[in-house]
Image (spheres, grey):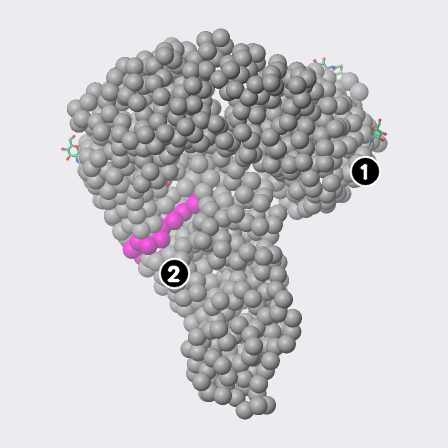
Amino acid sequence: MQGHGMCLKLLLAFALLLLQCVDGGEVSRKHRDANVTGRCIEKERQALLAFKRGLVDKFDVLSSWGSEAQKQDCCRWIGVSCSNQTGHVLQLDLSYKVVGAHSWNYSLLEGKMISPKLIELQYLHHLDLHEINFNGSHIPDFIGSLSNLRYLDLSYTNFGGKFPSQVGNLTNLQHLDLRFNDFINAENLDWLPLLSSLRYLDLSGTNLNNVFDWPEAINKLPELTNLTLWECDLPSPILSPLSYINSSKSLASVDLLGNHLSTSSIFLWLSNYSTSLNLVGSVPDVLGNMSSLAHLKLLNNQLEGGDPHSFSRLCSLQILDLATNRLNVLDFSWNDLAGSLPDLTNLSSLEILLLYNNQLSRGIPESIGRMSKLKIIDFHMKFFGVISETHFSTLSKLQYLDLSSQNSSNSLVLDIHADWIPPFQLYSINLGSCKMGLHFPKWLQTQKQIKYLDISDAGISDILPSWFWSLCRNVEFMNLTGNQIRGSFANLTLEFSYSPELHLSSNKLEGPIPSVLSTASYLDLSHNKLSGSISFLCSSAAIGLSFLDLSRNNVSREVPDCLTHLENLVMLDLSYNALSGKIPTTIGSVFRIETLKLRSNRFVGQLPLSLKNCTSLVLVDVGDNKLSRPIPKWLGVSLRNLVILMLSSNHFNGSLPAQICHLTDIQILDFSMNNISGSIPKCLNNLTTLVQKGKSSLEITHFLEHSNGTTTYEDDATFIWKGRMYSYKNTLGLVKRIDLSSNILTGEIPSEITHLVGLVSLNLSENQLTGQIIPEIGNLQSLEALDLSRNQIEGRIPTSLARIDRLDFLDLSFNNLSGGIPIGTQLQSFDPSVYAGNPQLCGAPLKKMCAAQHVQTDLSNQEDDKDEIITLGFYISMGVGFAAGFWGRYAYFKFLNGLNDWLYVRVALIKRQLKDMLNR
Ligand SMILES: *[C@@H]1O[C@H](CO)[C@@H](O)[C@H](O)[C@H]1NC(C)=O
Ligand SMILES: *[C@@H]1O[C@H](CO)[C@@H](O)[C@H](O)[C@H]1NC(C)=O
Ligand SMILES: *[C@@H]1O[C@H](CO)[C@@H](O)[C@H](O)[C@H]1NC(C)=O
Ligand SMILES: *[C@@H]1O[C@H](CO)[C@@H](O)[C@H](O)[C@H]1NC(C)=O
Ligand SMILES: *[C@@H]1O[C@H](CO)[C@@H](O)[C@H](O)[C@H]1NC(C)=O
Ligand SMILES: *[C@@H]1O[C@H](CO)[C@@H](O)[C@H](O)[C@H]1NC(C)=O
Ligand SMILES: *[C@@H]1O[C@H](CO)[C@@H](O)[C@H](O)[C@H]1NC(C)=O
């Protein structure tokens, strides 16, 4: 989470670096401003304007691009850089880093097509369209004519069609990034060797499963330093004895995550030798020859050595490697190593030991305690066994310790005496989900330099010791979530040096919240027993707060009307407390807010008019309060970004304003259990997200910018689904529902509702609706739950209802329906109770038989395309979700990308710490 931000920073830094190195002839905006007019070449200006016409710029991010007089100089347009000598456009960078990203979606720009006029930019050598969604359109052939291109980034652009092998004509290319598009398989990589200047290549996500000669193609790139081929379904290489490996001389980074290669074949590929498959013989030679290879990552492959014996041989090979290359990093992370870790004490100069994501079930030998040079130990995840003081006996240089795992059933036991004095001073302690014992670890008191502390979910059930906060002056990140830590903040008197990220959720902390906590940038105190008022928010220090979760505590009284300085707050959750009074007017000053949750308190009055100002709101949940008055019209007019609006269980009255139909992004509309009267607006078909099937991200993600970087969080929401209460987070983005139940709505169900083909759940029960069920109800093909019970609906059950394959929750009870339940359909499979209370209804599954004239048979084609779309229920059971279709895949790769970011962060952190160490 925290890491994401650092990664962005890294990327930014990298982008800057590139900008600096690309070309001496290029000038920065500052330089250009000194010399303004007339440098832009008319033909190129026209080409850029044509290019812009191929984009969809909803947010007007390209407002500087135009034909108006004051916009003449295209060299000053955003994303464009020209040569200061010739005026030719050299660089076009419209990646989200330049034009900005949507709060929870991707680039603000979208694409329709790439205008052929682009080839007028003959001098262009840098083109970056990263994350602009081109919705499956094709990369035009003429891309191969931009012969000066040195840098081409079309990653995550959702281009489709054939793999664009014309890029083979771009012989000056040094950097090529085509990862994660929707190309049809690359038939071959014959074009690749033409790119003899290529240094950086990323084709991740391209299906290369038929390209057996991929290593040869890559071998022909003499300058290649960085190679990334994630999830390419690479076949294990077949090598002819004569294949040479020129590129390994320059390769500095190889990343093949998510293929299913055997390591021996890779080592072989990376070697000059193809005659021997003997791992023992070949590995040291291989590594010995690759003098510039500093880091070989073979993430998620099958590193041979599942058997500990062969693993230890591999290890001794690493010793040779370390000796000849002076490497001091041992990285076996992300493999399927099993068994126990062998004795590594011969590696006496080892400083960094990375073994995360392996499964060494037999634990870690105490001998690592003798590797006195160790500075970094990272054993994250899937380890077992007991760690004692002996494991650390001589590790006086240790600064970074990660023994965390993903869940506590799968973790290390830390067996350490209460009075242990460790030899080290750690910056970074990550013991998340380690079993640390019931008592708060006393040895932490000796650690005076902590910046990162995670002892979450560690089984601690103790009072927070009085010395604890004094350790935290320099803390940037803390996670104590999921213990049973008691006590209060009474002894928290120091000021934090940084605006820390504090995760203190799910403990038993009590008492009032001190104002010093308002200096945090991220504060999660949810699921505790905190009480008193929340006046700490009135501290002017709260200006840096971007995330505040106080849900499920016992805070009470009114929310003070002092929120004027919360100008950076993006997420506010005060749900499930005992807050009362009105929602304060100063909420209007919290204008960056995207998530507002006030559910289950005792708020009264109306939604304050000032809330109009909070136009970034994506989620509003004020359910289960005592709010009243009609639902304001401005809600639909001002809060246009709303995706989730939950006003249920209040005292809202009046009729539904037609303006809610302006909420084109809405996915969840929950007005249930109020006193809303009148009819259902007909304009519902304007809810454009609901009239589309699928096409949603799995999660609703928000980005928080703060002094330490960027953090993300995902929205969650809790509501009744098919009769049970569920909480959604990982799949919330897929839930599309309308719930108007338990109000006093009258009139007919508007037929426009059948346009909402994306709707997954529709609940109109317990109203006074009349008329018939719309015959076209069967159009709602995504529907899984339909509740029309307890109304006054009459007429027959339309046969089309039987054609909604996914419908598995239905309630039509207590209406005035009549005639036969369509037979020969799944409608018979429901419990009879779903039809109860309709005296004139007949046919199975009801006991009452129909007279012959009432029988309805659905003889339409029952052939269904079940595998095409996977139901929401499926996603829910998957947890994290692996969705079908492009959007799902996109999200999945996003998830993988996050994983990579996480790796980056680790490496970044390690590098930073190494730098710190060297500086001493
Ligand atoms: C172009 O810009 C570069 C870098 O700012 C500068 O070194 C060079 O002198 C400039 N050339 C001209 C002709 O102004
Ligand atoms: C740029 O500005 C400098 C002084 O501001 C001037 O001497 C030079 O001629 C200008 N160059 C162009 C191409 O306008
Ligand atoms: C690529 O190069 C080949 C051979 O030089 C040429 O025939 C072809 O037209 C070029 N394609 C493009 C798109 O420039
Ligand atoms: C290439 O790999 C090296 C070594 O891992 C790394 O430092 C560098 O940042 C990478 N370059 C790019 C452009 O990602
Ligand atoms: C904090 O710890 C909990 C429990 O181990 C974990 O679920 C959560 O992801 C952690 N939060 C962060 C930001 O690392
Ligand atoms: C605060 O610290 C003092 C000792 O410094 C201790 O006696 C007291 O119990 C602590 N109070 C709380 C509420 O933890
Ligand atoms: C609305 O937000 C702006 C900042 O965008 C702020 O200056 C103004 O005070 C806010 N208005 C209200 C009524 O809170």
* Secondary structure found at label 1: helix
Residue beneath disc 1? 116
Q: Nearer the viewer, residue 295 or 899?
A: 295
Q: Nearer the viewer, residue 13 or 275?
A: 275
Which portion, as a residue range, is magenta?
569-582
Q: Quadrant of ligand 3?
A: top right
Q: Mark 2 is on which residue type? A: Met
Could you classify mark 2 by the number of other residues whose Cα lies within 10 Å: few (under 14), some (14-19), or many (20 or more)? Answer: few
Is residue 439 located in the magenta-colored stretch of the structure?
no
Separation of residues labelled 2 and 1 (CA atoms)? 54 Å
Residue beneath disc 2? 725
Q: Nearer the viewer, residue 784 or 154?
A: 784
Total numbered badges shown on the rendered structure: 2
Indicate the position of residue 631 as horizontal and vertical percent values: 48, 64
Q: Earlier in the sequence, mark 2 or mark 1?
A: 1
In the image, what residue occupies the spot 57% across and 62% down? 782
Q: Tell me the tag on residue 478.
A: none
Screen quadrant of the N terminus = top left
Indicate the position of residue 339 as horizontal and vertical percent values: 36, 29
The image quadrant that residue 797 belongs to is bottom right
Question: Residue 612, can we see it?
Answer: no
Indicate the position of residue 195 as horizontal and vertical percent values: 73, 23
Question: Residue 3, can we see it?
Answer: yes
Compared to residue 398, the image places residue 635 above or below, namely: below
Indicate the position of residue 303 as horizontal and vertical percent values: 48, 28
Q: Mark 1 is on which residue type? A: Pro
Tell me: 721 left or right of 657. left
In the image, what residue occupies the spot 42% across and 77% down? 833
